Image: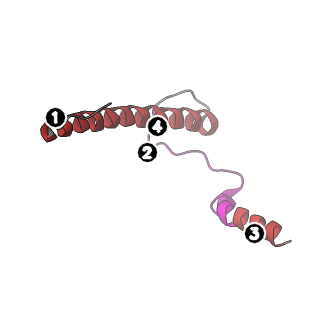
Amino acid sequence: MKLSHNPILNWLILTGLAFCVGIIGSIAAIVFLGVIAFFHNLFFLHSVNLFYQETWHTPSSMLGILTMDYDRFAKEIALTSLRT
C-alpha cells in the first residue's frame, strides 16, 4: 500500500490501522480468557463453563504446598541435568 504525500491522510490511515489492530487484539484476548476459563473449570472444578470467577476456589491438591514450589524444583532438575 502506497501512502500519499498528505500527512493528515497518512495519520488517519495509521490511526485506522491501529484501531483495527486494537479491536482484533481485544477480541483475541477475550477469546483466550474464555479458553483458559474453560480448561481451568474442566480440569479443576470438573464443570464445563466459559466464565472464570476469581471468588470460586479450586479444591485443594493432594500435593499441598509442593505445588507452589514446582517451578523451583523444575529449575533445579533442569540445571542439574545440564551440568552433567
Residue drawn 57% across the image and 38% down it: 40
Q: Is residue 6 left or right of residue 29?
A: left
Q: Which residue is mark 1?
A: 9
Q: Relative to residue 76, is residue 48 depicted above or below?
A: above
As drawn, the label of residue 33 is 4
- C-alpha separation, residue under disc 4 versus residue under disc 3: 33 Å
> Few, some or many C-alpha atoms within 10 Å of disc 3 (few <14, some 14-19, many ≥20)?
few
Q: How far is mark 1 from mark 4, CA to CA?
A: 36 Å
Q: Identify residue for label 3.
A: 79
Q: Circles 4 and 3: CB distance less than 8 Å?
A: no
Judging depth in this view, the residue of 58 and 29 nearest the camera is: 29
Query: Pointers 3 and 1 in contact (CB under 8 A)?
Result: no
Q: Would residue 1 be counted in the magenta stretch? A: no
- At x 14% / y 37%, what residue is drawn? 6
Crowding at dot 2, Cα within 10 Å, few <14 / some 14-19 / many 20+, comes out as few
**Residue type (three-letter) at the residue carrying disc 3:** Leu
**Residue 52 position within the rendered picture, expressed as x and y whole percent measured from the top left:** 46, 37
Q: Are marks 1 and 4 in contact (CB under 8 Å)?
A: no
Q: CA distance from mark 4 to mark 2?
A: 16 Å
Q: Secondary structure at mark 3?
A: helix
Considering depth in this image, is 83 or 13 the residue closer to the camera?
A: 13
Residue 56 is inside the magenta segment: yes
- Dot 1 surroundings within 10 Å: few (below 14), some, or many (20 or more)? few
Question: Which mark is on residue 55?
Answer: 2
Instruction: Give the mark, 2 or 3, whose residue is nearer the N terminus.
Output: 2
Quadrant of the drawing holding the N terminus: top left
- Side (left or right) of 12 relative to 19: left
First of labels 1, 4 by sequence position: 1
Residue depth check, mark 1 versus mark 4: number of the one nearer the observer: 1
| Magenta segment | 51-72
CA distance separating discs 2 and 1: 48 Å
* Rendered view: 57 above or below 17: below
